[in-house]
Amino acid sequence: MKRHDLFDVAAARALAEGLPFAGALTPREAHQLASEGAAKIVDIRTRPEWEFVGHIEDTPLIEWKSYGSSRPNPDFVDKLAARFAHDEAILLICRSGIRSRDAATAAAQAGFTRVYNVLEGFEGDQDEEGRRGNLGGWRHAGLPWTQH
């Protein structure tokens, strides 16, 4: 699919779901846009998740919530603004797409006009045995990632 078509699909999802940010993308759509240089992916999980579960190569980590904290990082939007322009296409990814939805909402409220949520996240939803990685997500889609 062409770049502008993917952004249109993401915007249609936002409209259909009443999202307060630019849109929502599947992991494959996010990968295509990032690979083409049309958008930047930002991992918003905790540092331990990023280090021990794995992450997308060359993707910055800006924690939405720090490990052990139940509250959003008060510096999240400032850290995002220090690295990205408010009109730059930014794709936020977390473990399952829930925290990144909340982070995208906060970013949009702070004036980011092209912030998107990556649906399913890095690991996807839990399966019937409580494990992640089998039901959706970046890794399940077979997209490139690394673990150090």
Image (cartoon, rainbow, N blue to C red):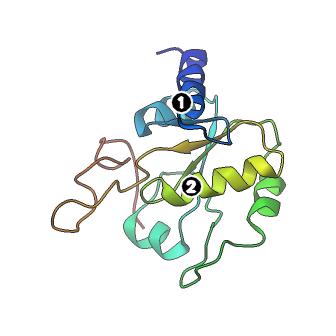
Q: Name the side, left or right, on which 106 lies relative to 55.
A: right
* Residue 100 image label: 2
Quarter assignment of residue 22: top right
Q: Is residue 63 above or below residue 124?
A: below
Mark 2 lies on a secondary structure that is helix
Mark 1 lies on a secondary structure that is helix
Quarter assignment of residue 125: bottom left
Q: Position of residue 144 (x, y in %)?
A: 39, 44
Residue lying furthest bottom: 68
Mark closer to the observer (1, 2): 1
Q: Position of residue 111 (x, y in %)?
A: 83, 45
Query: At x 54% / y 60%, what residue is drawn?
Result: 99
Q: Amino acid at mark 1?
A: Ala
* Residue 109 image label: none
Q: Name the side, left or right, on which 5 lies relative to 137.
A: right
Counting residues from the N terminus, which is met first, the one under dot 1 or under dot 2?
Answer: 1
Mark 1 neighbour density, 10 Å: few (under 14) some (14–19) many (20 or more)? few
Q: Amino acid at mark 2?
A: Ser
For mark 1, what is the residue? 16
> Gap in Å between the C-alphas at discs 1 and 2?
18 Å
